[in-house]
Image: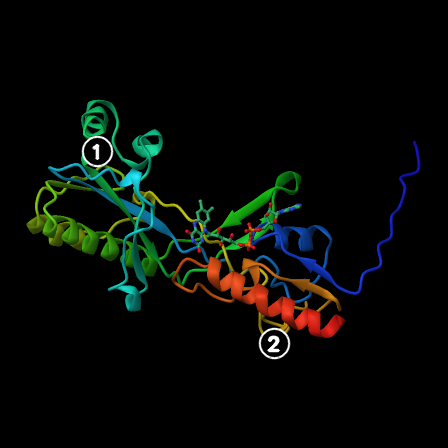
């Protein structure tokens, strides 16, 4: 057995910026900053799903910027509708059909419009080290999330029918098809189980959240960890709760502020 070389790096400050899943995993693997038990907790996800609609005319949503269109009318209610037309290569995966029903709709893919429904979540999950140190994420879709998702999907269906859609296809188990606006109310009234939604998430946040109370947070207001001096976390893991909009600008603004604080400290 050979001796493994040791390298020591002296730094005036260290910035951890791996993102909301790798950053807490790194701290957990090094047994750092977790006296409060908060590392990896408070995971918010902005759960999202989609609803497609078939129109008479060509839509060709895949030729434009995906998020060129959106509806923020229901934002106060924690619901954001965003254009999300997939390219043809991904289109089949965005439709809850198979067999003949799928090929029929794919034949008319030019006429299919798809929007995403993203919600502000109240549920909080957790990132842990799973077998072999791999990320293990747990998250519970609660009644609040299910209600919001279904309400967002129903409003989107109404918008589609008002715009002349022939058929509306929510991404759900059982592949429901709504033929007219009159069917939306009944569809919305039937409460769904979490497993019936086809869900995605692109915005994990909060797993090393910022706060002034070391018992409830991992980093202070200056991004420095409460437990290890000169260790800073600057990524989405510090965002304390879901902003209910796509979070990149919030993360960049926080990173900009952190860089100014750090520069002022080090220069
Ligand atoms: C498909 C998709 C679409 C999205 N669209 C939007 C959008 O339209 N608008 C929006 O606002 N947000 C969007 N987001 C979310 C946005 O990308 C993230 O919220 C944001 O990038 C998170 O920033 P971050 O700095 O926390 O982490 P990241 O941007 O993930 O940065 C972390 C970096 O750390 C690196 N890293 C991780 N682990 C290690 C390691 N062990 N060693 C070395 N390097 C490591 C990663 O490679 C990465 O470069 C989208 C996300 C996805 C997945």
Quarter of image, res 209? bottom right
Tell whether 153 sits left or right of 19.
Answer: left
Mark 1 or 2, nearer chain start: 1
Q: Going by the picture, which residue comes out furthest to the bottom?
A: 212
Quarter of image, res 118? bottom left
Residue 76 location, x and y as percent?
Answer: 30, 69
Question: Is the Cβ of the residue at disc 1 closer than 8 Å to that at disc 2?
Answer: no
- Mark 2, ligand 1, within 8 Å: the answer is no
Residue 164 visible in rendering: yes
Q: Which residue is mark 1?
A: 110
Badge 1: how crowded within 10 Å, few (<14), some, or many (20+)? some
Q: Which residue is mark 2?
A: 213
Quarter of image, res 222? bottom right
Q: Quadrant of the N terminus?
A: top right
Looking at the rendered image, the disc whose residue lies closer to the viewer, 1 or 2, is 1
Residue displayed at 33% across by 50% down:
67
Tell whether 12 sits left or right of 68.
Answer: right
């Amino acid at each position: 057995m050979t001796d493994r070389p040791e390298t020591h790096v002296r730094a005036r400050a260290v910035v951890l910026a791996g993102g909301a899943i790798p950053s807490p995993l790194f701290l957990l693997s090094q047994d750092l900053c977790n006296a409060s038990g908060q590392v990896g907790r408070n995971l918010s996800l902005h759960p999202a799903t989609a609803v497609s609609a078939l129109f008479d005319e060509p839509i060709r949503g895949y030729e434009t910027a995906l998020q060129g269109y959106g509806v923020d009318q229901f934002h106060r209610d924690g619901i954001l509708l965003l254009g999300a037309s997939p390219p043809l290569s991904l289109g089949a995966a965005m439709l809850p059909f198979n067999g003949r029903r799928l090929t029929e709709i794919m034949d008319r893919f030019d006429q299919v419009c798809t929007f995403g429904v993203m919600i502000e979540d109240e549920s909080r999950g957790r990132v842990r080290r799973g077998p072999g140190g791999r990320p293990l994420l747990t998250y519970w879709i609660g009644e609040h999330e299910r209600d919001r998702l279904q309400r967002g999907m129903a409003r989107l269906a109404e918008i589609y029918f008002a715009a002349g859609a022939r058929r509306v296809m929510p991404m759900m188990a059982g592949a429901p098809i709504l033929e007219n606006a009159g069917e939306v109310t009944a569809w919305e009234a039937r409460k769904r189980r979490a497993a019936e939604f086809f869900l995605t998430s692109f915005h994990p946040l909060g797993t090393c959240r910022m706060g002034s109370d070391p018992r409830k947070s991992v980093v202070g207001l200056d991004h420095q960890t409460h437990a290890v001096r000169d260790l800073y976390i600057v990524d989405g893991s510090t965002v304390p709760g879901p902003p209910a909009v796509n979070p990149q600008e919030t993360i960049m603004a926080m990173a900009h502020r952190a860089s100014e604080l750090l520069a002022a400290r080090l220069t």
